[in-house]
Amino acid sequence: MSWKICHATAFEPEAYLVKGFLEHQGIPCLLEPRRFGMEPVRTGTLGTIGILVPEEWVPVAAKLISHRARRPAHTPGRVIAFDARRRRRRTPATGWKGGSDL
């Protein structure tokens, strides 16, 4: 069985997250740290870590990673008004009742 790189990253935590994600999907994975080899150290990233999968799994793994990496379209947040001076308390007869206890 030959192993091929399906994804490479410069960050070790990201490599472990991708590996865990792929393993959760049932794809066997290995990490190949290529940071400290005979090659000179790359400026900024200090090398990369490759995520290896069996050759027949490369298209599936690459597709899963690319779909996972997409960011959703930006949706504007909703602003909720909050008055810290006003407290709510629940009374058995009236339900929620607003009022100030200060």
Image: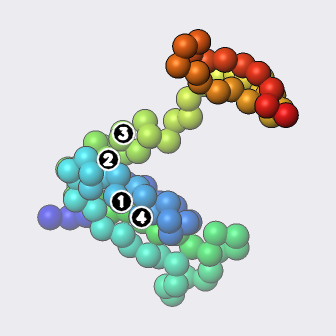
Mark 4 vs mark 2, foreground winner is 4
Query: Is 93 located above or below residue 38 in the figure?
Result: above
Tell me whether circle 2 and circle 1 mark residues in contact (CB < 8 Å): no
Q: Is residue 59 above or below residue 55?
A: above
Mark with earlier residue (4, 3): 4
Q: Are marks 4 and 1 in contact (CB under 8 Å)?
A: yes
Q: Residue at x 76, y 21 (%)?
A: 99
Can residue 28 be seen here? The reply is yes
Question: Can you give x and y, in whole percent of width and height, for residue 22 in the image?
Answer: 31, 52
Out of 59 and 91, give the one closest to the viewer: 91
Q: From mark 4 to mark 2, how far is it between C-alphas?
A: 15 Å
Mark closer to the chain start, 1 or 3: 1
The picture quadrant where one finds residue 47 is bottom right
In this view, 88 is above or below 52: above
Which mark identifies residue 16? Answer: 4
Q: Amino acid at mark 1?
A: Lys
Q: Are marks 2 and 3 in contact (CB under 8 Å)?
A: yes
Q: Which mark is residue 19?
A: 1
Marking on residue 61: 2
Nearer the N terminus, badge 2 or badge 1?
Answer: 1
Which residue extends farthest top?
94
Q: CA distance from mark 4 to mark 1?
A: 5 Å
Label 1: which secondary element: helix
Rendered view: 83 above or below 23: above
- In the picture, the quarter occupied by the N terminus is bottom left
Other-residue count near label 2 (Cα within 10 Å), few / some / many at <14 / 14–19 / ≥20: many
Circles 1 and 3: CB distance less than 8 Å?
no
Q: Which residue is mark 3?
A: 63
Label 1 neighbourhood size at 10 Å, few (<14), some (14-19), many (20+)? many
* Secondary structure of the residue carrying numbered label 2: helix
Q: Residue furthest front?
A: 93
